[in-house]
Image: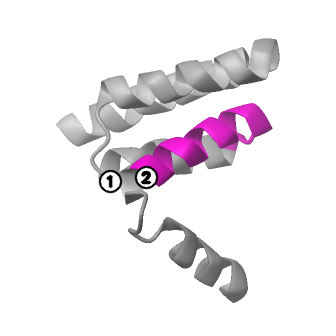
Amino acid sequence: MAGFGQLHKQAMAEGALSAKFKELITLAISITSRCEGCIAVHVRGALRAGATRQEILEAIGVAVYMGGGPAMVYGCNAYEALGQFEAAAAG
């Protein structure tokens, strides 16, 4: 696990791509890979990195476009997670 944690830290570090952009990429990959846990982690990560609702919705849309019908189901999961995290933040 420590090795994966280090890989995550290095991959998500600011560089030529911002952390926000990397979170949006990982969210789209999570949707097309059908990984529910990953979706929640990366919706939250995108919000924490400063992504707007519209940016997240567009990333979901691109993932559904690329992933077809199965990605639609997981895109809906990402949309639900976004709503839950926004509601929690609003307190």
Q: Main secondary structure of the magenta part?
A: helix
Q: Residue at x 58, y 23 (%)?
A: 62
**Picture mark count:** 2
| Label 1–label 2 contact, CB within 8 A | yes
Judge from the rendering whether residue 82 lies leftward or rightward of residue 86; answer left or right. Answer: right
Q: Which residues are magenta?
A: 21-36
What percent of the width, then of the height, locates residue 75?
62, 23
Callout 1: helix, strand or loop?
loop
Spatial CA span between label 1 and label 2: 6 Å
Q: Residue at x 37, y 57 (%)?
A: 18
Which disc number belongs to residue 80? none
Callout 2: helix, strand or loop?
helix
Q: Nearer the viewer, residue 87 or 67?
A: 67
**Residue for badge 2:** 45
Amino acid residing under circle 2: Gly
Q: Is residue 76 magenta?
A: no
What percent of the width, then of the height, locates residue 79?
50, 23
Quarter holding the C terminus is: top left
Q: Nearer the viewer, residue 18 or 57?
A: 18
Q: Quadrant of residue 54?
A: top left
Which disc number belongs to residue 49? 1
